[in-house]
């Protein structure tokens, strides 16, 4: 017995690969460039977006029939901003340490176009359960790319993963550094993320040629 | 139930209702949680101040580790012996001076009004620490912190924090590998209060040169680093009259 019908399962599966928000829909690129210098920041951002998109999609879907079409973008913005601020306040009161880590991401989440994009493209036209699955799926697809980019940028740029020195110590010249390896400082700055995302897009489209748009 | 959601009157009513509902919800949440949040912020200030004078639970090379919130109040009253506010080179004792909002005081100074600059004196193992609160600008938003010096104007410890610097880049000013570099640096260059520069091309990753008024900058965080340098310099300017009276070298 499947937990989800095939159609529902696809709502989660598609955004992970063939309909990925970053590499195919090209949504949420800004935050993918901005905060992927470290793996830890990528993971935190992915989890935050998972939560906000999951809940936000449901809320928008529930009120989709009463939202005036003329101001729907503003309504979406209000929903996501209110949601993020409430979560931020609750964390500040009951999990202060965690909220310190997340506070930097609050602004990034509100302005993340993946959230508005999914509200607009899916939640406005579908029921809450489907919207929830769509939100989770897209957030996961977004998260995967973030983690991949974060992995390469932190490894090649700083020689660390989650802050752990995996390639040796660049100052004391141990491990890989003893044979002349150097960190690539270029990987730390945002343009490098664009290149890594570009490579992912290239790999993905050469594996699945159906994704290539007709010129 | 069909509503004509395209009507102007409906749109206006919806917008007004939405603002009222969401606004009161946020106000309700904010005021309900305020006491708890204030308490957390007070503990955090105490933790940060103690951190700057070297009272923390750091182990080896890892992450920043504060005194736990459950103990911080006792530790704070144990180590912080005097809380002062400065009026020129005069220092007057004031209860809970550490809670003074430095941002507001700096704004008053800019406007030429009378301001209260807090200064804390801590004592640990017979050594005296003069802890200066700082406030400045990073790339995206505010940065702040605490700087502790001894009578020789040698930095005993720093703590930096920020509101919205880029994670992985500017946000690393609150990482130990950056803050630890400041320890032992002198804020004096001859007889001037030069502060400590966050310098590119300092080429001193182990920070062995403690007399150069410089620490290595963070790659990819030039503006945040410049903000830190400027913040230290500005704060020293304000505290100079008092520091002159305690300086021994």
Image (cartoon, coloured by chain):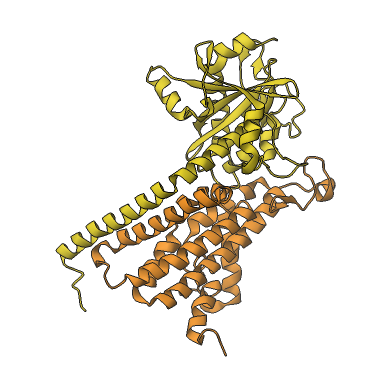
Chain colours: A orange, B yellow
Identify which residue is drawn at 58% across, 39% down.
B221
Name the side, left or right, on which B238 lies relative to B104.
right
Percent x, y for residue B117? Answer: 50, 21
Q: Using the image, determine if residue B11 lies above or below residue B220.
A: below
Percent x, y for residue B200? Answer: 64, 32
Res A41 visible: yes
Viewer-nearest residue: B116 or B113: B116
Name the side, left or right, on which B156 lies relative to B17.
right
Name the side, left or right, on which A168 lies relative to B82.
right
How many callouts does the rendering have?
0
Identify which residue is drawn at 48% across, 55% down.
A30
Res B200 visible: no
Outermost residue, bottom direction? Answer: A1
In the figure, residue B171 lies in which quadrant? Answer: top right
Identify which residue is drawn at 40% across, 22% down.
B108
In the figure, residue A83 lies in which quadrant? Answer: bottom left
Percent x, y for residue A10? Answer: 51, 81
Q: Using the image, determine if residue A157 lies above or below residue B222.
A: below
Viewer-nearest residue: B25 or A84: B25
Identify which residue is drawn at 54% across, 39% down.
B162
Viewer-nearest residue: B146 or A178: B146
In the figure, residue B60 lies in which quadrant? Answer: top right
Percent x, y for residue B228? Answer: 57, 31
Q: Quadrant of the C terminus of chain A?
A: bottom left
Name the side, left or right, on which B213 lies relative to A119.
right
Q: Quadrant of the N terminus of chain A?
A: bottom right
């Amino acid at each position: 017995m499947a937990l989800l019908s095939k159609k529902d399962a696809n709502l989660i599966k598609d955004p992970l690969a063939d309909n990925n928000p970053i590499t195919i829909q090209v949504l949420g690129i800004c935050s993918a460039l901005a905060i992927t210098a470290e793996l830890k920041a990528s993971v935190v951002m992915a989890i935050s977006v998972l939560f906000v998109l999951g809940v936000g999609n449901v809320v928008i879907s529930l009120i989709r029939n009463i939202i005036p079409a003329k101001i729907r973008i503003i309504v979406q913005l209000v929903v996501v901003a209110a949601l993020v601020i409430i979560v931020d306040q609750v964390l500040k009161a009951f999990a202060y340490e965690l909220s310190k880590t997340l506070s930097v991401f609050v602004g990034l989440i509100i302005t993340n176009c993946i959230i508005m994009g999914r509200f607009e493209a899916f939640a406005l036209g579908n029921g809450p359960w489907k919207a929830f699955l769509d939100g989770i799926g897209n957030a996961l697809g977004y998260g995967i790319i973030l983690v991949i980019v974060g992995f390469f940028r932190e490894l090649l740029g700083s020689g660390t993963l989650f802050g752990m020195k995996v390639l040796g110590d660049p100052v004391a010249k141990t491990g890989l550094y003893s044979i002349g390896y150097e960190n690539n400082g270029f990987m730390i700055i945002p343009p490098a993320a664009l290149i890594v995302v570009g490579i992912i897009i290239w790999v993905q489209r050469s594996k699945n040629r159906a994704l290539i748009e007709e010129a | 139930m069909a509503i004509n959601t395209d009507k102007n009157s409906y749109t206006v009513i919806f917008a007004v209702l939405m603002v009222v509902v969401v606004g009161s919800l946020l106000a309700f949440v904010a005021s309900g949680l305020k006491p708890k949040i204030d308490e957390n912020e007070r503990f955090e200030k105490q933790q940060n101040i103690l951190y700057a004078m070297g009272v923390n639970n750091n182990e080896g090379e890892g992450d920043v580790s504060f005194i736990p919130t459950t103990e911080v109040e006792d530790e704070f009253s144990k180590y912080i012996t005097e809380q002062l506010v400065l009026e020129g080179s005069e220092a007057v004792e004031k209860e809970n001076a550490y809670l003074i909002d430095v941002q507001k005081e700096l704004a008053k100074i800019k406007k030429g009004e009378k301001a209260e600059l807090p200064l804390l004196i801590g004592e640990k193992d017979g050594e005296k620490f003069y802890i200066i609160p700082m406030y400045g600008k990073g790339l995206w938003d505010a940065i702040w912190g605490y700087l502790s010096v001894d009578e020789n104007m040698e930095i005993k410890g720093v703590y930096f924090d920020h509101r919205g610097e880029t994670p992985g880049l500017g946000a690393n000013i609150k990482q130990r590998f950056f803050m630890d570099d400041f320890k032992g640096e002198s804020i004096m260059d001859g007889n001037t209060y030069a502060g400590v520069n966050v310098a590119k091309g300092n080429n001193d990753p182990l920070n062995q040169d403690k007399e150069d008024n410089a620490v290595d900058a963070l790659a990819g965080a030039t503006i945040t680093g410049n903000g830190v340098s400027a913040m230290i310099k500005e704060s020293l300017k304000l505290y100079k009259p008092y520091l002159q009276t305690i300086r021994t070298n």
